[in-house]
Image (spheres, rainbow, N blue to C red):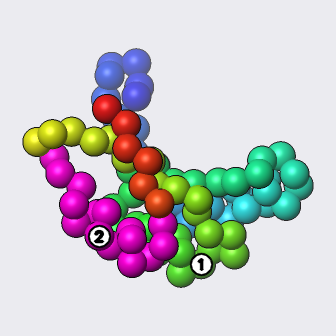
Amino acid sequence: MDAAGKIIMSDDDYVDTWKEMEKCVDLGLTKSIGISNFNSEQSQRVLDIARIKPVTNQVNFKYLMPVKYLSTTHFLLYLYIAAYF
């Protein structure tokens, strides 16, 4: 956010970020990496290029916003979901 409270959009691609995170694993800076609040399409896009598969997708779980579809598709992708409130 800028000083006026407006969201600043970025041209950065999360696929490029994922590749850099894989380098952190290679350097021994972390043991595992994951994604957060990705929908099924975003998750698949990362899996398509990933040399190291995400360990989990951390998602915000709300009663009025079910993640059933997300959990089903992630199950098929062998990707765990960690929900937080």
The residue shown at (48%, 66%) is 79
Q: Nearer the viewer, residue 76 or 26?
A: 76
Asked if residue 15 is positioned above or below residue 44 in the image, the reply reads above
The residue under the point 68% across, 65% down is 19
Query: Where in the figure is residue 12, as x and y percent of width and height?
Result: 53, 56
Left or right of 43 in this view: 66: left
- Front residue of 11/63: it is 63
- Left or right side of 19 for 13: left
For marks 2 and 1, give the CA distance.
21 Å
Residue 68's label in the rendered image is none
| Residue stretch in magenta | 65-79
For the question of whether residue 79 can be seen, the reply is yes
The quarter of the rendered structure image containing the C terminus is top left
Location of residue 62 by image quarter:
top left
Which element is circle 2 on?
Answer: helix
The earlier-in-sequence mark between 2 and 1 is 1
Residue at the left extreme of this rendering? 64
| Residue 9, placed above or below residue 18 | above
Residue picked out by circle 1: 49
Residue at x-position 29% and y-position 70%: 72
Under mark 2, the amino acid is Thr
Rendered location of residue 68, percent (x, y): 22, 60
Q: Residues within 10 Å of mark 1 (few under 14, many from 20)?
A: few
Q: Is mark 1 on a helix, strand or loop?
A: helix
Q: Name the residue under label 2.
A: 72
Task: Work out which quarter of the rendered image holds the N terminus and state it.
Answer: top left
* Secondary structure character of the magenta stretch overall: helix
